[in-house]
Image (tube, helix red, strand yellow):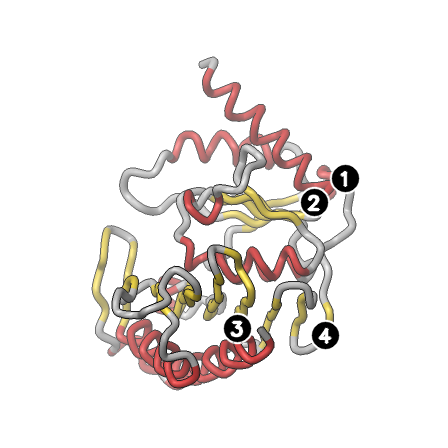
Protein backbone atom coordinates (compact mmCIF):
# COMPACT_ATOMS: atom_id res chain seq x y z
CA UNK A 1 0.00 0.00 0.00
CA UNK A 2 2.99 2.33 -0.07
CA UNK A 3 2.20 3.40 -3.63
CA UNK A 4 -1.34 4.20 -2.57
CA UNK A 5 -0.05 6.20 0.40
CA UNK A 6 2.29 8.13 -1.88
CA UNK A 7 -0.63 8.91 -4.19
CA UNK A 8 -2.70 10.14 -1.25
CA UNK A 9 0.18 12.33 -0.07
CA UNK A 10 0.60 13.85 -3.53
CA UNK A 11 -3.13 14.53 -3.77
CA UNK A 12 -3.28 16.04 -0.27
CA UNK A 13 -0.37 18.38 -0.94
CA UNK A 14 -1.83 19.56 -4.24
CA UNK A 15 -5.15 20.09 -2.48
CA UNK A 16 -3.37 22.12 0.17
CA UNK A 17 -1.83 24.33 -2.50
CA UNK A 18 -5.30 25.17 -3.82
CA UNK A 19 -6.56 25.94 -0.33
CA UNK A 20 -3.65 28.28 0.39
CA UNK A 21 -3.84 30.03 -2.99
CA UNK A 22 -7.47 30.92 -2.39
CA UNK A 23 -7.24 31.92 1.25
CA UNK A 24 -6.84 35.62 0.49
CA UNK A 25 -9.99 35.76 -1.62
CA UNK A 26 -12.39 34.04 0.76
CA UNK A 27 -14.72 37.05 0.70
CA UNK A 28 -15.29 36.60 -3.04
CA UNK A 29 -15.73 32.81 -3.11
CA UNK A 30 -18.96 31.28 -4.36
CA UNK A 31 -20.57 29.58 -1.36
CA UNK A 32 -23.60 27.31 -1.23
CA UNK A 33 -25.48 26.16 1.87
CA UNK A 34 -26.12 22.41 1.56
CA UNK A 35 -28.14 22.51 4.75
CA UNK A 36 -28.43 24.92 7.64
CA UNK A 37 -24.90 25.59 8.99
CA UNK A 38 -23.37 23.21 6.42
CA UNK A 39 -21.55 25.03 3.63
CA UNK A 40 -19.64 24.16 0.48
CA UNK A 41 -17.41 26.68 -1.27
CA UNK A 42 -15.91 26.67 -4.74
CA UNK A 43 -12.61 25.78 -3.04
CA UNK A 44 -14.13 22.55 -1.71
CA UNK A 45 -15.15 21.67 -5.25
CA UNK A 46 -11.82 22.63 -6.81
CA UNK A 47 -9.90 20.66 -4.21
CA UNK A 48 -12.09 17.58 -4.54
CA UNK A 49 -11.77 17.61 -8.33
CA UNK A 50 -7.97 17.81 -8.06
CA UNK A 51 -7.78 14.94 -5.57
CA UNK A 52 -10.01 12.70 -7.67
CA UNK A 53 -8.01 13.56 -10.79
CA UNK A 54 -4.69 12.63 -9.17
CA UNK A 55 -6.05 9.37 -7.79
CA UNK A 56 -7.69 8.54 -11.12
CA UNK A 57 -4.43 8.84 -13.03
CA UNK A 58 -2.84 6.10 -10.91
CA UNK A 59 -5.91 4.05 -10.03
CA UNK A 60 -8.50 4.55 -12.78
CA UNK A 61 -10.58 1.57 -11.67
CA UNK A 62 -10.86 2.44 -7.98
CA UNK A 63 -14.16 3.80 -6.73
CA UNK A 64 -14.54 7.14 -5.00
CA UNK A 65 -16.63 8.31 -2.05
CA UNK A 66 -16.22 12.07 -1.71
CA UNK A 67 -18.08 14.62 0.36
CA UNK A 68 -19.22 16.88 -2.45
CA UNK A 69 -19.55 14.55 -5.45
CA UNK A 70 -20.79 11.48 -3.60
CA UNK A 71 -20.12 7.88 -4.59
CA UNK A 72 -18.86 6.79 -7.99
CA UNK A 73 -20.93 4.05 -9.58
CA UNK A 74 -19.08 3.40 -12.84
CA UNK A 75 -16.01 1.52 -11.59
CA UNK A 76 -15.68 -2.24 -12.09
CA UNK A 77 -14.15 -3.04 -8.67
CA UNK A 78 -16.21 -0.75 -6.48
CA UNK A 79 -16.52 -3.43 -3.80
CA UNK A 80 -12.73 -3.82 -3.48
CA UNK A 81 -10.95 -0.44 -3.46
CA UNK A 82 -12.60 2.78 -2.39
CA UNK A 83 -11.04 6.20 -1.77
CA UNK A 84 -12.81 8.24 0.91
CA UNK A 85 -12.24 11.97 0.52
CA UNK A 86 -13.00 15.10 2.52
CA UNK A 87 -11.49 17.89 0.43
CA UNK A 88 -11.75 20.58 3.11
CA UNK A 89 -12.74 19.48 6.58
CA UNK A 90 -13.56 22.64 8.46
CA UNK A 91 -15.05 24.72 5.64
CA UNK A 92 -16.75 27.10 8.09
CA UNK A 93 -13.40 27.71 9.79
CA UNK A 94 -11.80 28.36 6.41
CA UNK A 95 -14.45 30.84 5.37
CA UNK A 96 -13.99 32.77 8.63
CA UNK A 97 -10.20 32.73 8.61
CA UNK A 98 -10.07 30.44 11.64
CA UNK A 99 -6.83 28.47 11.16
CA UNK A 100 -8.00 24.91 11.80
CA UNK A 101 -8.97 22.94 8.69
CA UNK A 102 -7.57 20.01 6.77
CA UNK A 103 -7.62 17.66 3.81
CA UNK A 104 -8.51 14.04 4.58
CA UNK A 105 -7.96 11.09 2.24
CA UNK A 106 -8.31 7.38 3.05
CA UNK A 107 -8.20 4.16 1.04
CA UNK A 108 -10.37 1.22 2.00
CA UNK A 109 -9.93 -2.29 0.60
CA UNK A 110 -12.86 -4.66 1.07
CA UNK A 111 -14.16 -2.53 3.95
CA UNK A 112 -10.78 -2.41 5.74
CA UNK A 113 -8.89 0.87 5.96
CA UNK A 114 -5.43 0.52 4.43
CA UNK A 115 -4.02 4.04 4.06
CA UNK A 116 -4.83 7.45 5.45
CA UNK A 117 -3.54 11.01 5.11
CA UNK A 118 -4.59 14.20 6.88
CA UNK A 119 -2.91 17.42 5.76
CA UNK A 120 -3.00 20.79 7.48
CA UNK A 121 -1.86 23.17 4.72
CA UNK A 122 -1.51 26.20 6.98
CA UNK A 123 1.02 24.50 9.26
CA UNK A 124 2.47 22.22 6.63
CA UNK A 125 1.72 19.21 8.83
CA UNK A 126 1.19 15.87 7.11
CA UNK A 127 -0.20 13.01 9.20
CA UNK A 128 0.07 9.61 7.48
CA UNK A 129 -0.48 5.93 8.09
CA UNK A 130 -0.62 2.68 6.18
CA UNK A 131 -1.82 -0.52 7.78
CA UNK A 132 0.94 -2.26 9.73
CA UNK A 133 3.52 0.48 9.21
CA UNK A 134 2.75 2.91 12.02
CA UNK A 135 1.78 6.57 11.86
CA UNK A 136 3.89 9.62 11.12
CA UNK A 137 3.81 13.41 11.27
CA UNK A 138 6.09 14.89 8.61
CA UNK A 139 7.93 11.55 8.39
CA UNK A 140 8.49 11.26 12.16
CA UNK A 141 6.80 8.45 14.08
CA UNK A 142 3.95 9.49 16.36
CA UNK A 143 2.16 7.74 19.23
CA UNK A 144 -0.92 8.41 21.27
CA UNK A 145 -0.32 9.57 24.83
CA UNK A 146 0.26 7.08 27.63
CA UNK A 147 -1.92 9.00 30.08
CA UNK A 148 -3.93 6.69 32.33
CA UNK A 149 -5.80 9.26 34.43
CA UNK A 150 -8.93 10.67 32.79
CA UNK A 151 -8.95 13.56 35.25
CA UNK A 152 -5.72 14.86 33.67
CA UNK A 153 -6.86 14.39 30.08
CA UNK A 154 -7.43 17.03 27.41
CA UNK A 155 -10.20 15.92 25.05
CA UNK A 156 -11.45 17.12 21.71
CA UNK A 157 -15.06 17.10 20.54
CA UNK A 158 -17.48 18.63 18.07
CA UNK A 159 -20.74 20.40 18.83
CA UNK A 160 -23.94 19.44 17.02
CA UNK A 161 -24.64 22.04 14.33
CA UNK A 162 -27.08 20.43 11.92
CA UNK A 163 -30.85 20.50 12.21
CA UNK A 164 -32.29 17.34 13.73
CA UNK A 165 -29.27 16.41 15.81
CA UNK A 166 -29.87 15.35 19.41
CA UNK A 167 -28.33 18.31 21.21
CA UNK A 168 -29.57 17.34 24.65
CA UNK A 169 -27.96 13.89 24.56
CA UNK A 170 -24.69 15.42 23.41
CA UNK A 171 -24.79 18.00 26.19
CA UNK A 172 -25.18 15.18 28.70
CA UNK A 173 -21.93 13.65 27.47
CA UNK A 174 -20.21 17.04 27.42
CA UNK A 175 -21.28 17.77 30.97
CA UNK A 176 -20.14 14.35 32.18
CA UNK A 177 -16.71 14.54 30.56
CA UNK A 178 -16.15 18.19 31.51
CA UNK A 179 -16.51 17.20 35.13
CA UNK A 180 -14.04 14.33 34.81
CA UNK A 181 -11.23 15.85 32.70
CA UNK A 182 -8.82 18.78 32.69
CA UNK A 183 -10.35 20.38 29.60
CA UNK A 184 -12.40 20.08 26.42
CA UNK A 185 -11.56 21.65 23.06
CA UNK A 186 -13.87 22.19 20.08
CA UNK A 187 -11.82 23.38 17.10
CA UNK A 188 -14.06 22.53 14.13
CA UNK A 189 -12.20 19.94 12.04
CA UNK A 190 -12.85 16.40 13.22
CA UNK A 191 -10.22 14.97 10.87
CA UNK A 192 -7.51 17.23 12.28
CA UNK A 193 -8.68 16.60 15.84
CA UNK A 194 -8.26 12.86 15.28
CA UNK A 195 -4.79 13.47 13.90
CA UNK A 196 -4.02 15.39 17.09
CA UNK A 197 -5.06 12.37 19.15
CA UNK A 198 -2.65 10.23 17.14
CA UNK A 199 0.14 12.77 17.71
CA UNK A 200 -0.52 13.07 21.45
CA UNK A 201 -1.76 16.66 21.34
CA UNK A 202 -5.17 15.52 22.52
CA UNK A 203 -5.65 12.57 24.83
CA UNK A 204 -9.00 11.60 23.37
CA UNK A 205 -11.90 12.63 21.16
CA UNK A 206 -15.61 11.96 20.87
CA UNK A 207 -18.36 13.20 18.59
CA UNK A 208 -21.67 12.06 17.10
CA UNK A 209 -23.29 12.08 13.64
CA UNK A 210 -20.11 12.56 11.65
CA UNK A 211 -19.70 11.35 8.07
CA UNK A 212 -17.29 8.63 7.04
CA UNK A 213 -15.13 11.10 5.10
CA UNK A 214 -14.65 13.11 8.31
CA UNK A 215 -13.14 10.21 10.21
CA UNK A 216 -11.85 7.42 7.94
CA UNK A 217 -8.24 8.61 7.62
CA UNK A 218 -8.09 9.67 11.26
CA UNK A 219 -9.29 6.28 12.47
CA UNK A 220 -6.44 4.44 10.76
CA UNK A 221 -3.84 7.01 11.82
CA UNK A 222 -4.90 6.68 15.47
CA UNK A 223 -4.87 2.88 15.33
CA UNK A 224 -1.41 2.86 13.75
CA UNK A 225 -0.28 5.29 16.49
CA UNK A 226 -1.31 2.77 19.16
CA UNK A 227 -4.78 4.09 19.96
CA UNK A 228 -8.27 2.65 19.91
CA UNK A 229 -11.27 3.84 17.93
CA UNK A 230 -14.86 2.72 18.26
CA UNK A 231 -18.43 3.75 18.87
CA UNK A 232 -19.71 4.94 22.28
CA UNK A 233 -20.85 1.41 23.13
CA UNK A 234 -17.37 0.02 22.51
CA UNK A 235 -18.36 -1.54 19.21
CA UNK A 236 -17.13 -1.00 15.68
CA UNK A 237 -20.02 0.81 14.00
CA UNK A 238 -18.31 4.22 14.03
CA UNK A 239 -17.64 4.38 10.28
CA UNK A 240 -21.30 3.62 9.57
CA UNK A 241 -22.96 5.68 12.33
CA UNK A 242 -20.48 8.54 12.63
CA UNK A 243 -20.58 8.17 16.41
CA UNK A 244 -16.94 7.94 17.46
CA UNK A 245 -14.71 7.68 20.51
CA UNK A 246 -10.91 7.64 20.20
CA UNK A 247 -8.08 7.60 22.73
CA UNK A 248 -5.20 5.52 24.03
CA UNK A 249 -6.37 2.09 25.27
CA UNK A 250 -6.65 3.06 28.96
CA UNK A 251 -8.48 6.33 28.42
CA UNK A 252 -10.66 4.77 25.74
CA UNK A 253 -12.16 2.42 28.32
CA UNK A 254 -12.56 5.25 30.82
CA UNK A 255 -14.33 7.45 28.26
CA UNK A 256 -16.68 4.62 27.35
CA UNK A 257 -17.58 4.25 31.01
CA UNK A 258 -18.40 7.93 31.41
CA UNK A 259 -20.40 8.01 28.18
CA UNK A 260 -22.34 4.91 29.22
CA UNK A 261 -23.19 6.47 32.59
CA UNK A 262 -24.31 9.69 30.91
CA UNK A 263 -26.51 7.73 28.52
CA UNK A 264 -28.05 5.69 31.34
CA UNK A 265 -28.69 8.80 33.44
CA UNK A 266 -30.59 10.44 30.60
CA UNK A 267 -32.63 7.30 30.09
CA UNK A 268 -33.73 7.47 33.71
CA UNK A 269 -34.85 11.12 33.61
Instruction: Indicate the quadrant containing the C terminus: top left, top right, bottom left or bottom right.
Output: top left
Q: Disc 3 and disc 4: Cα gap in Å?
A: 14 Å
Please state which of the two labelled residues, at mark 4 or mark 1, is closer to the viewer.
4
Using the image, determine if residue 102 lies above or below residue 145.
below
Tag 1, which secondary structure? loop
Q: Earlier in the sequence, mark 3 or mark 4?
A: 3
Work out how far the residue at label 1 is from the one at label 3, CA to CA, in angstroms.
30 Å
Residue 18: % across, % down: 39, 83
- Number of marks drawn: 4
Q: Quadrant of residue 167?
A: top left
Any mark on residue 242, and which? none
Q: Residues within 10 Å of mark 3 (few under 14, many from 20)?
A: many
Q: Which numbered marker is on residue 119?
A: 3
Q: CA distance from mark 4 to mark 1?
A: 27 Å
Image quadrant occupied by the N terminus? bottom right
Residue 153 is labelled as 2
The answer to whether the residues at label 1 and label 2 have Cβ atoms under 8 Å apart is yes
Q: Secondary structure at mark 3?
A: strand
- Tell me which numbered mark, 3 or 2, is placed earlier along the sequence: 3
Front tag of 4 and 2: 4
- Sequence-wise, which precedes: disc 1 or disc 3? 3
Residue occupying the far top of the picture: 268
- Residue 256 vs 101, above or below: the answer is above
Evaluate if marks 3 and 2 touch, with contact meaning CB atoms under 8 Å apart: no
Crowding near pointer 1: few (<14 within 10 Å), some, many (20+)?
few
Q: Is residue 163 visible?
A: yes
The residue where tag 4 is placed is 140
The Cα–Cα distance between marks 3 and 2, rounded to whole angstroms, is 25 Å
> Which residue is painted at 49% across and 58% down in the image?
216
Image-based side of 187 in relation to 258, left or right: left
Residue appearing at x 41%, y 70% in the figure: 97
Q: Which residue is mark 1?
A: 149
Amino acid sequence: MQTALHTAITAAREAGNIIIRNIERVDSLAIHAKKKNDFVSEVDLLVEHEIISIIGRTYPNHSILAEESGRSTDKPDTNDYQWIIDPLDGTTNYLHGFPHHSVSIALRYRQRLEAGVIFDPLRGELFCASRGNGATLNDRKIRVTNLVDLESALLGTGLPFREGQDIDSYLDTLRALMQRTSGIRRAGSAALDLAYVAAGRLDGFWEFDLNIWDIAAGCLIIQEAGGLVGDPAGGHTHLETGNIVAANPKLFRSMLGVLHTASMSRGQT
